[in-house]
Amino acid sequence: MNRRPEVRVESPTERINAGTTDIDLLSTQDILRVLNSEDRLVPEAVGHALPELARAVDLAVASLRAGGRVHYVGAGTSGRLAVLDAAELVPTFNVPPDWFVAHQAGGAEAFRHAVEDAEDDTASGAASIEAQAGGSDFVLGLSASGRTPFVLGALGAARRLGAATALVSANPGVASSAPADVVITVDTGPEPVTGSTRMKAGTAQKLVLTSLSTATMIRLGRTYSNLMVSMVATNAKLRGRTLSILQEATGASERDCQRALAEAGGELKVALVHLLSGADVERASAALDRADGHVREALRSLE
């Protein structure tokens, strides 16, 4: 039986942007004005995808609560953005370094230099997931076109392992055929420079990644209110920020906050629960352990 030829669905990012065809004739300021005007379309496009993004957040939360991990998979700009987001979560939210794992086509070398044909290697994408993921994990693929072989190979392998999956794409045409449980389509339209997905599509991916990881951390109790109470104070600036966060959250004096931090061994959450509840640091620490680090749950248990 003859196989029907594959239909290639053109991504909006590959189309000509009618509003920028004369961009090379403009003054510097007008070039920037046009680019800025195009960039303003991105947040609205991300907003249309919030229901699907919420589903992806819930999958990430469920995986981490079950002892699994979150994997980002991308090539080129997508892979670099994935590496950036995963790296920033450790100091910001004090998460274990293996909670979020970034897989970039071409490996570490591709972070600084283009690695030819790496994104076309379906088997390599599959192998990267097969070697590091399991059935309790969540795998998020990033592909502006929605058809990057490295990413699709990784998602296919993840599904065979029983892992939850999602795809972030700028191409609505692939939504129905994507090998993922959730498809997050952010239609940013034609790029100002045709096909340059480091522009609007890349900005959309950055917004999606930042929102997904931040919402996941909030759901897991890595914040209290809108404060970064889980961050790692690795330098003088961050130690000062720890003190200011504690003052902001409790309304206590600088002296009392310094004392509480000292008694808590520098653990911001312990000092916070201690000051807000009146419990000693030992009880505050135990309450946080029982609450898996959720400050509000720990406080409720001490009422």
Image (cartoon, rainbow, N blue to C red):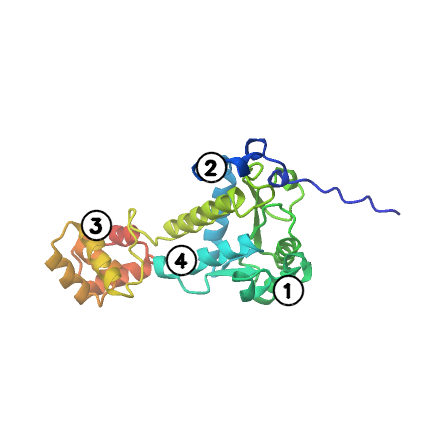
Q: Which residue is mark 3?
A: 249
Q: Residue furthest top?
A: 18
Label number found at residue 27: 2
Q: Is residue 292 visible?
A: no
Q: Which residue is mark 4?
A: 89
Q: Amino acid at mark 3?
A: Ala
Examine the image and state in which quarter residue 132 appears. Answer: bottom right
Residue 124 in the image, given as x and y percentages of width and height:
65, 63
User: How far is disc 2 from disc 4 in space, using C-alphas?
Assistant: 40 Å
Residue 248 in the image, given as x and y percentages of width and height:
20, 49
Q: Which residue is mark 1?
A: 127
User: As displayed, is residue 89 above or below residue 194?
Assistant: below
User: How far is disc 4 from disc 1 in space, using C-alphas?
Assistant: 25 Å
Q: Nearer the viewer, mark 4 or mark 3?
A: 4
Q: Amino acid at mark 1?
A: Ala
Q: Is residue 288 visible?
A: yes
Precedes in sequence: disc 4 or disc 3: 4
Q: Nearer the viewer, mark 2 or mark 4?
A: 2
Q: Are marks 2 and 1 in contact (CB under 8 Å)?
A: no
Q: Amino acid at mark 4?
A: Leu
User: How far is disc 3 from disc 1 in space, using C-alphas?
Assistant: 46 Å
User: How far is disc 4 from disc 3 in space, using C-alphas?
Assistant: 22 Å
Callout 3 secondary element:
helix
Give the residue at x 11% y 54%.
253
Give the residue at x 35% y 53%.
221
Q: Amino acid at mark 2?
A: Ser
Give the residue at x 34% y 54%.
222
Examine the image and state in which quarter residue 233 appears. Answer: bottom left
Q: Nearer the viewer, mark 2 or mark 3?
A: 2
Is 205 on the left or on the right of 276, as rendered? Answer: right
Residue 108 in the image, given as x and y percentages of width and height:
53, 66
